[in-house]
Image (cartoon, rainbow, N blue to C red):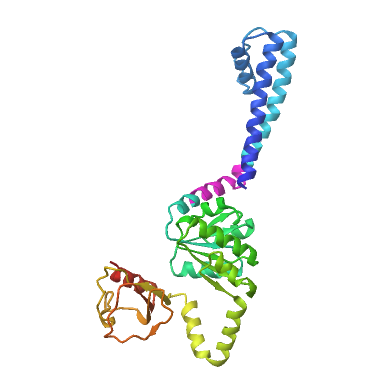
Amino acid sequence: MELEFSTRLKTVLAAMGACLLIGTFGYTTVEGWPLFDSLYMTVITLATIGYGEVHPLSTGGRIFTIALSLLGLGVMAYSFSALTAFIVGGELNERLRRRKMEKRIQVLDRHYVIFGMGHTGETIAAELANTRHDFVVIEHDAEKGSAALERGHLVVIGDALRDETLERAGVARAKGVFLTFDNDRDNVFVALSCRVMNPNVRIVSELHDGDVRDKLFRSGADAVVSPPMIGGLRMASEMIRPAAVGFLDSMIRAKDSAYRFEQVDLPAGSLYDGKPFGSIEVGGGRAPLILAVRAKNAERYEVNPPRSRPMKAGEQLVALGDQDEIRMLREAVKA
């Protein structure tokens, strides 16, 4: 749409410019007038102002004026219809909305970027929206991009294989990216592009072929998720532990609350450094449930830590609570 409007505007301006040049040099050639007088006569003729002739016209000049008037009427009619279609067709509102959205994207920082709005991308977007995280969608398909816009998402429509598109989505400032392309080749290429553009970004990629797993990690992915494997584990869990799976489903799908498992980092200088887990309180006696803790980059988790166990700076807490409780916990433990 942006390209169509630019092309249409350039065509209108080129046609109007051509009329001015033809008229100006026509009067100069036919009547021998100075350039400014010829330009002035051309403008008042095309604009149908009717101020009168700059100089008396010869027969040849009158014939040229008739031709120029007819040409001008055609150009003005085309220009008017093109601009009217642009406004009445809603393209103006769409263009203004896109400009407003681009400005919102430009000020985002530590946000997430979703590549592709297939089934996986839509699920990720819904979860990020429910948990109040800022994110931008990159989608090559204009129809899918428009559908995401209708849901209120920030969207960049463009080719994710081009650095320009990544820059428009703010990948250089992003906290994390999700790669959900239908083929692993694109996932590998974009993972590498994102890693080069932002060495600190966390990259989670969808995996379709197990043989590509190592290539994704070498390209910069921090984690890969295989839908067939996750689907198989889910089916097994539905069979052998339906109550636990049902609890997780009800927690995720509930519309009146947003309880989630969240990671909360304990930074250096935190007021809770050295204090026991039992001392955590985030307002009104509310506090998320601390399910596990691990040292940063450690392999193993300490599940259900004792209330008397002291916390240490650099540890990562795995907490269960609604989004307000998690937000207050992050505020409480920050440096």
Image check: 130 left or right of 65? left
Q: Is residue 226 above or below residue 26?
A: below
- Name the residue located 67 percent from the left edge and 19 percent from the top edge: 23
Residue 109, given in percent of the width and then of the height, sits at: 42, 57
Looking at the image, can residue 210 be seen?
Answer: yes
**Residue 17 percent coordinates (x, y):** 64, 26
Q: Look at 62% across and 10% down and name the residue there.
A: 34
- Furthest residue to the bottom? 240
Can see residue 148?
Answer: no
What is the span of residues highlighted in magenta in the rendered image? 86-100
Quadrant assignment, res 74: top right
Residue at image position (72%, 12%) is 61
The image shows residue 63, relative to residue 331, as above or below, that is above
How far across and down, in percent of the image, does residue 131 sit? 44, 70
Where residue 170 appears, as percent x and y from the top left, is: 48, 55
Q: Quadrant of residue 200?
A: bottom left
Q: Is residue 74 left or right of residue 245?
A: right
Please tell me whether the stretch drawn in magenta is mainly helix, strand or loop.
helix
The quarter of the picture where the C terminus appears is bottom left
Image vertical order of residue 220 relative to residue 7, above or below:
below
Q: Residue at x 29, y 71 (%)?
A: 333
Q: Nearer the viewer, residue 55 or 173?
A: 173
Q: Report the front residue among 76 and 176.
A: 176
The one nearer the camera, 44 or 320, is 320
- In the displayed structure, would residue 302 be above or below residue 33? below
